Image (cartoon, grey):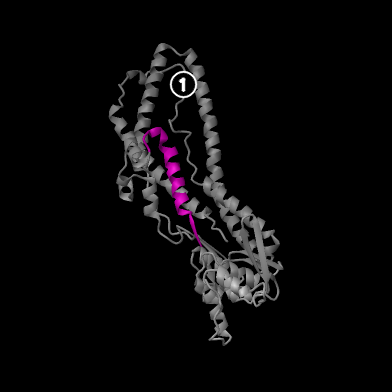
Amino acid sequence: MTFCNHSQFRKIYTTYATEILTYIRNRIKAKEALEMLPKESIQYNELIYEGAYFVRVDRDSDFGEIENPHANYDNSLANLISMIVAMRGDEYYSEFSKDLDQVIQLITKIYHAIHLKSESLRLERIIKNYIISAINGYNEDVSVSATSKEREQREFIEAKAEFIGHLIDAIRKNTKDNPFPNPPSPVSGYSSNPKCGFCFTSEAGYHERDVLSEFLSKMFTKSYASIDALKRIETVDELVSAVNRCTDSNQIDTTFNRNLSAFFDEMCQCKSYIIDTTQGNEELGNTLGELSLAYFKYMTEHENERCIFLIDQPEDHISNNNISQKLLKYFNTIRTRKQIIMVTHNPLLVVNQDVDNVIFVQKHGDTIDVVCGCLELENSDVNILDIVAKNMDGGKDSIEKRLRVYGKDNYSVNVSI
């Protein structure tokens, strides 16, 4: 049987779930920043205009905070190039070597452009951190020799900078673009393995389906299991109420990830089925009988390594009609090239295959009696047809039907059942 690869589906919905949580938390931070402003205040102090012996160096509170939106794309492209280079070295792709070289060249060009942007921001962050460290060290040295007025002046300047920083932070968080992430498109979760006239197929629960409603229902409570409801969340308490099975703000991430795992467990369950390509791509059922027939057909038509075919009760879960129409045919195709040893309680498999040797085993107390012979064996001691008729359900009818095939319409088995 074949199995589905769920990595793409998991990656897409993990990213989507993370983006939703980030969107909500950005809204919460924006509201909290606004709500903090009325609580902020600063008292004017004329000391700010008085001169000081030492020059004080100040910086914005977010001077060293630099986001690098290029870093993830930089890493992704680097990994992609490494993967394609590895493919280029694989003998299997030798006929596509020129095409792969062109792909590597094009992606490398894009990578260099993005990597340059990412490196510029990384170096800027390093330089600013050096500057922050130098400023902090200088101000600490200055504070040791400062007068009380100078320290009061410094404290006022720091309070003023913090007040302005809160204003800027609130403005940024409330004007920053924060779009709700777009729902993922349906993902393929299908794999097949064609072999010997069959196609062994596995299909995931999410295959080519819009599973957004299932995702929202698994991740969030009923009141919040919609995009419109999620867009209205503005507080931590609302987020706790929204996340399914979450009761505490400290457990939001843990519970959220647990819900996501449960969603994956449900969606990644696969339905496996078999298609008989020799019968017009007919899909075989999933009952034990139908699967058994597919197995016997596969083994009898395409198994060439083993010379002995040993089977225990092949008739289980298969209807008499399918035994007559299909199973007997499968076994008859290999009888000339394999030794078939079969344990059965079904007379159809005995009478209709012209078996070479019927072995009848019966227990009497502590003794096991064994009688054997070809199907036509009949003498003063043994009558194989008589044994079949007496000891197998439907045996008498099966024998009479088989004999009628040979034109013996008036023949009946002389047994008492």
- The spot of residue 27 in percent (x, y) is 35, 41
| Quadrant where the image shows the N terminus | bottom right
Q: Amino acid at mark 1?
A: Val
Q: Which residues are magenta?
A: 246-273
Number of other residues with Cα within 10 Å of mark 1, as a class: few under 14, some 14 to 19, many 20 or more: few
- Left/right placement of residue 50 relative to residue 327 reads left
The image shows a total of numbered marks equal to 1
- The spot of residue 81 in percent (x, y) is 61, 54
Q: Is residue 120 above or below residue 88?
A: above
Q: Is residue 334 above or below residue 265?
A: below
- The spot of residue 90 in percent (x, y) is 69, 60
The single residue placed furthest to the bottom in the displayed view is: 407
The single residue placed furthest to the left in the displayed view is: 38
Residue at (64, 77) in percent of width and height: 354
Q: Is residue 149 visible?
A: yes
The front one of 63 and 189 is: 189
* Residue wearing tag 1: 55
> The residue tagged with tag 1: helix, strand or loop?
loop
- Left/right placement of residue 7 relative to residue 94 reads left
The single residue placed furthest to the front in the displayed view is: 380
Secondary structure mostly taken by the magenta-highlighted segment of the chain: helix
- The spot of residue 178 in percent (x, y) is 37, 46
The front one of 335 and 345 is: 345
Residue at (31, 46) in percent of width and height: 222
Residue at (46, 21) in percent of width and height: 55
Q: Is residue 340 visible?
A: no
- Left/right placement of residue 390 relative to residue 216 reads right
